[in-house]
Amino acid sequence: MLQILPLITPDLAEDQRLSPYLGLRRKSCTYPGTFPVPRKRGIPLPADTAEGLKNAIGMDEPLSLPGFLAKFDSYMPAIAGSREAIKRIAYEFVEMKAKEGVVYVEVRYSPHLLANSKVEPIPWNQAEGDVTPDEVVALVSQGLQEGERDFGVKVRSILCCMRHQPNWSSEVVELCKKYQQQTVVAVDLAGDETIEGSSLFPGHVKAYEAAVKSGIHRTVHAGEAGSAEVVREAVDILKTERVGHGYEVVEDEALYDKLRQENMHFEVQK
C-alpha cells in the first residue's frame, strides 16, 4: 500500500484557498464572521446567513473538479483585495484548527487570487486596487503567526501556482523564498488539472526548476481528476516531493510501485 502520513494540509480558498470556514468539500461549520467584510464592501454573497451560504457553496454529492472549483466564484470576490478579510481569515483559521484539536497544520493558497494589484489578469473581475500578491503573503503570514501565538497551533503555509496562469508561477517561487522565515515552507501547483498539458507549461516548469535550485519544498496536485500520467509529470518533470490526492496513480502499476518504493507522500483527504 502507498504510505499515508497523518499530515493535515487543507485547501483554503484554493488553492483560491483562503476561506477555510466556508466548507467547500463538505458542508462543515461556517463562522458568522464571514459576513461583515462583504457587507461593508457592498459585495453580495449567494446567501445572507451562514446556513444559506453552506447550502450554496457546500458539497454533499460528488462534482467534477471544474465544478468544484467553480464554487469559488461565489465568494472570492468578497475576500480578494481586502486586507481585513485576508488577515482575519488566516487568524480565524488557526482558531478553528485549535478547536478541532489540531497541533500542526499546513495551509495553502494562491497569493495572486487574493490580490488586485500587480497581477495580470486581475482575478474575480475586481477593479484594480492596491493589494499585491506580496502583501497578501505578508497579511496571511501575520494572521497565521498571531493565531499560533494565541491558540498554540503550529502553522505553516504553502503558496500555490495555478495551472491556468503559468505567468504567475515564477513570482510564487520568489515569494516562497522571501517568506521562508514567516510560515512559508513550500510551493504547490493547483487548480484544474484537466487543462491538457498544464504540468508542462513552460512557466510552471521554469518555476519548479527554480524551486529545486533554491531548496524550496515542492508539492503538486495531480491524479485527482487527471490521469496517472499527470502524476508522472509531477514527479519526473516538476520534481515534486509530495502528491496532492494522486488517486489515479493506481491505474499505472509501474508508477504505483515506483512511488511506493520511494515512500512518496500522498496528501489524501478523508
Image (cartoon, grey):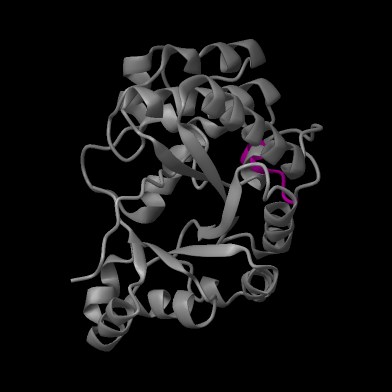
Q: Nearer the viewer, residue 123 or 168?
A: 168
Can you give x and y, in whole percent of width and height, for residue 28 in the image? 29, 28
In the visual, does 143 lie left or right of 21? right
The residue drawn where x is 81% and y is 32% is 130
Report the residue at 28% width, 36% height from top. Answer: 26
Residue 107 coordinates in the image, percent (x, y): 49, 42
Work out whether 219 lies above or below 140.
below
**Residue 30, horizontal then vertical, whole percent:** 37, 21
Verify whether residue 124 appears in magenta: yes
Along the line of sight, the residue nearer the viewer: 154 or 112: 154
Vertical position of residue 72 compared to residue 30: above or below: below
Tell which of 168 and 179 is nearer to you. Answer: 179
Please tell me which residue is depicted at 42% across the width and 40% down the height of the picture. 104
In this view, the residue farthest toward the bottom is 254
Q: At 54% from the left edge and 75% from the top edge, which residue is drawn?
A: 238
Q: Is residue 205 magenta?
A: no
Using residue 216 as the reference point, say whether residue 194 is left or right of it.
left
Q: Quadrant of residue 253?
A: bottom left
Q: Quick check: 105 above or below 267?
A: above
Visible residue check, residue 233: yes
Point out the image quarter for the N terminus: bottom left
Q: Nearer the viewer, residue 186 or 47?
A: 186
Please state the extent of the stretch shown in magenta in the rendering: 120-125
Q: Residue furthest left?
A: 1
Residue 267 falls left or right of residue 109: left
Q: Is residue 110 left or right of residue 103?
A: right
Res 194 → quadrant:
bottom left
**Residue 20 in picture, x, y percent from top left:** 44, 32
